[in-house]
Image: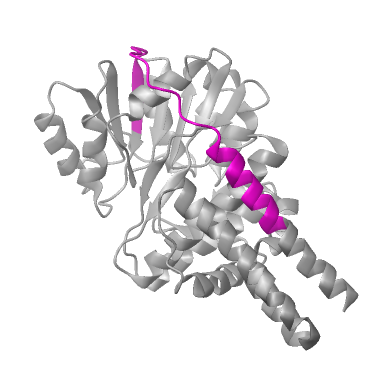
Amino acid sequence: MYIASLVLLGCWVYCLLAIAAAVRHTKQTRQKSLDACVPISILKPLSGLDEGLEQNLRSYFEQDYRNFEILFAVRWESDPAVPVVRKLMAEYSAVGSKLIFTGEPPYAHAKVFSLKCMLDEARHELIAMADSDVRVARDFCSSLATEFQDERLGLVTCPYRALAGDSIWSRLEAVGMNTDFHAGLFTAVMMEGTKFAVGPTIVARRSALESLGGIERVKDYLAEDYMLGRLASDHVDVRLSPYIVEHRIGSEPVTKNFAHRLRWARSSRRSRPAGYVGQFFTHPIPVGLLITLLWPSLWPFMALTIALRAAAAWIVSKRILGVSVPWALLPLQDMLGFAFWIAGFFGNSIQWRGRRYLLNRDGTMELAS
């Protein structure tokens, strides 16, 4: 029971660290946008017709900014995203934009190849790389340009509020992103600085990408976003931006949603093995229930465990990301998240956009035969 008590204490300590990290992040107020005219190239790798794709892409065309361009990349002209892109390019003809057909990628990570193809065509020094399921406000370009007025800054990564689709699985995943994932994100930044990046939106100087050998340096990694930030931090200043983007989660059926979450878990285990084991303490409710089932005398401590978990979830989701916590779904997501964490320890293959990949111990991947 002594060890069980220490484990429960570890969960409490993590919740307190997450609360402290969230409070620390709230003090990093966004700078007032300057009338900056730093030219920006926005890169949008596309594959298929994501839910809400037109509105997501439209938000980039409608930037209150004078000097930017948007580049899109798909493999083939038959991709269903192409008509959407062409419609928007015609509607916003005053915005510099270009659609690139990459063909079949020469290596496993198709997204990285799309980014390389767009970088080769991009005209500007400041590069914004944003996923197709991301939507931004009109001040996205001006806010990020303001941050890069600091000449020391080489790369920033943006936190995001996850907005769910209609399905229950989408809503549960959004709860996890808005509470668990970002609690861990802010805690990691507080404890060790920003030594990584998160995928939905990364903005970098072209010179920073070139300093680590170009975007191709991360072509073999499934978690290319994490590795890009990690490698860049050895050369330039990397920061977590105070600017929050929207990550639109589609209403995937349960099989695709679970495959996506399992891919995420296995990728995290390969990217940060020790950190992944430590995530045991980031699941206070499932761990607390397990402990109290084995040692019923510790049941009174569950009230404190629940209170700390709720406080951390509220301050991260509501106070920082601006999204209310669906309290009825939180316990179910906690149990589901714990199950996926356990599942992440097993297996070395993932399904991604209709293809099967094998994950190596160093986080690299390769197409399964």
Q: Is residue 211 found left or right of 361 in the rendered image?
A: left
Residue 19 magenta? yes
- Quadrant for residue 58, please give it: top left
Quadrant containing the N terminus in the rendered view: bottom right
Residue 352's place in the image compared with 213, above or below, is below
Residue 235 magenta? no
- Quadrant for residue 87, please give it: top left
Q: Is residue 63 found left or right of 339 in the rendered image?
A: left
Is residue 151 in sight in this rendering? yes
Q: Residue at x 26, y 33 (%)?
A: 60
- Quadrant for residue 300, please give it: bottom right
Residue 39's place in the image compared with 300, above or below, is above
Q: Is residue 57 found left or right of 89 in the rendered image?
A: right
- Residue 79 in picture, x, y percent from top left: 23, 46
Which of 227 and 165 lies nearest the eye of the viewer?
A: 165
Q: Residue at x 54, y 50 (%)?
A: 182
Is residue 256 in sight in this rendering? no
Which of 120 and 50 lies nearest the eye of the viewer?
A: 50
- Which residue occupies the extreme left position in the image? 91
Residue 27's place in the image compared with 335, above or below, is above
Q: Residue at x 29, y 28 (%)?
A: 71
What is the tally of numbered marks visible in this picture? 0
Q: Which residues are magenta?
A: 14-43
- Residue 69 in picture, x, y percent from top left: 28, 22
